[in-house]
Amino acid sequence: MNSTERRAVISLAGIFALRMLGLFSILPVFALYAVDLDGATPFLIGLALGAYGLTQAIFQIPFGIWSDRYGRKPVIAIGLIIFALGSLVAAVSDSITGIIFGRALQGSGAIAAAILALTADLTRADQRTKAMAVIGISIGAMFILAVIFAPVVEGWVGVPGLFWLTFILTIPALAVLWWLVPAEPRVERKPETMQFAGVLKNAALLKLDTGIFVLHLVMTALFVVTPGVIAQVTGWQTADHWKIYVPVLILSVIGMLPLVKRHSGVASPQRAFLIAIAILGVSQAVLVFTQHSLPLLIVALWLFFVGFNALEAMLPSQVSRLAPTQHRGAALGVYSTTEYLGVFVGGALGGWLHGQYGVNAVYLFSLVMVLLWLFVAAGLPGKSAVKSGNAVGTGK
């Protein structure tokens, strides 16, 4: 990367990371805290955690389209402010209803598509997968930090203090956006209806949207059942599961780098993409047949995160390649919406399958979904077929 690209990627990854650290820090501690809130029930506690994902799915497309129409930075700034207001509402609420509203308001600041679009705007095509990988790794790092340190910090300041921390972290994120992120390039702005219709007519983009839907469906379904499998195999409490997750996540970065490098290169990026999907499928197959062996369970999780992290970098890169600049926000908005829908469906179906048919049914279902994705992805165009000026809406 050149100096402008490095500054853009590091600063945008920093904005994403600060935002995700605030969100992830709630996950390990909220359920126990919420039991004592006014009006709390198990369903409402789950709704409080899931409300963020629902409003994210609803608003990703509008925010992506608005970023195409009005510019990336103003839309990202507005989204960060909405997110901060939601954090403030949750911090001062003493009822489960208030926190549900706060979490829903947090999710309404749906800036993922706009950030990814701006990242694509500010990087060359051959550097874009690296850029997306940096953002993906920063999100993974925030997840690790939250799992390890959130229970400690919550012991000092409580869950309301974590919401206040989320609110405060928005201030440096806004400062980074306006003073460190390079100026966005000037592009021709198109009417919103043209952008959205064009994106929905592009068969290749829809295949990539299918991919991110399956990827996050499988990820969520995995975590519906795998913590219980780990507890059964090791006898550990949930608080000790980081001893598996952290080394596996760190080592998965080493495993994903050759795939990302090959995908970024000139020769056959499609092969690296298909290999990453296949690795994801192998991880599910290993879990189906060997989940009761701790070493093989660790291998399966490592394979999963190698495939998952590599695909998290490759998919938005391919979307940004296929979508011309003036449609990029809309395309990434649809992409981000299907991502969050995958989280919702994976959690709901994974929980239902687990209750009805057991753990193996969840892993078998995930394996079938990955194999179907592999079949669909085999028909995607390679890099040689994707040129900077391709018209969205051609269906090719």
Image (cartoon, rainbow, N blue to C red):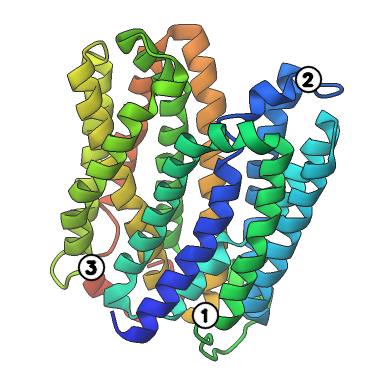
What SS does tag 3 mark? Answer: helix
Query: What residue type is disc 2 on?
Result: Asp
Q: Residue at x 50, y 31 (%)?
A: 346
Q: Nearer the viewer, mark 3 or mark 2?
A: 2
Residue pointed to by mark 3: 264
Q: Is residue 72 left or right of residue 384?
A: right
Res. 201 in view: no
Crowding near the residue tagged with mark 3, few <14, some 14–19, many ≥20 C-alpha atoms within 10 Å: many
Mark 1: amino acid: Leu
Q: Is residue 113 above or below residue 24?
A: below
Which circle's residue, 1 or 3, is located before the other in the chain? 1
Q: Residue at x 31, y 40 (%)?
A: 249
Q: Nearer the viewer, residue 109 or 29?
A: 29
Position of residue 53 in the picture relative to residue 212 (left or right) = right
- Residue 46 picture location, percent across and down: 67, 26
Question: Can you tell which quarter of the image residue 54 is in?
Answer: top right
Q: Classify the position of the C terminus by image quarter.
A: bottom left
Instruction: Give residue 172's quadrant in the image.
Output: bottom right
- Which is more N-terminal, label 2 or label 3? 2
Question: What residue is pinned by disc 2?
Answer: 36
What secondary structure is marked by label 1?
loop
Marks 1 and 2, how far apart at CA: 42 Å
Q: Residue 49 in the image: x percent, y percent?
A: 66, 34
The quadrant of the rendering that contains the N terminus is bottom left
Q: Is residue 115 above or below residue 368?
A: below
The residue to which callout 1 is attached is 180
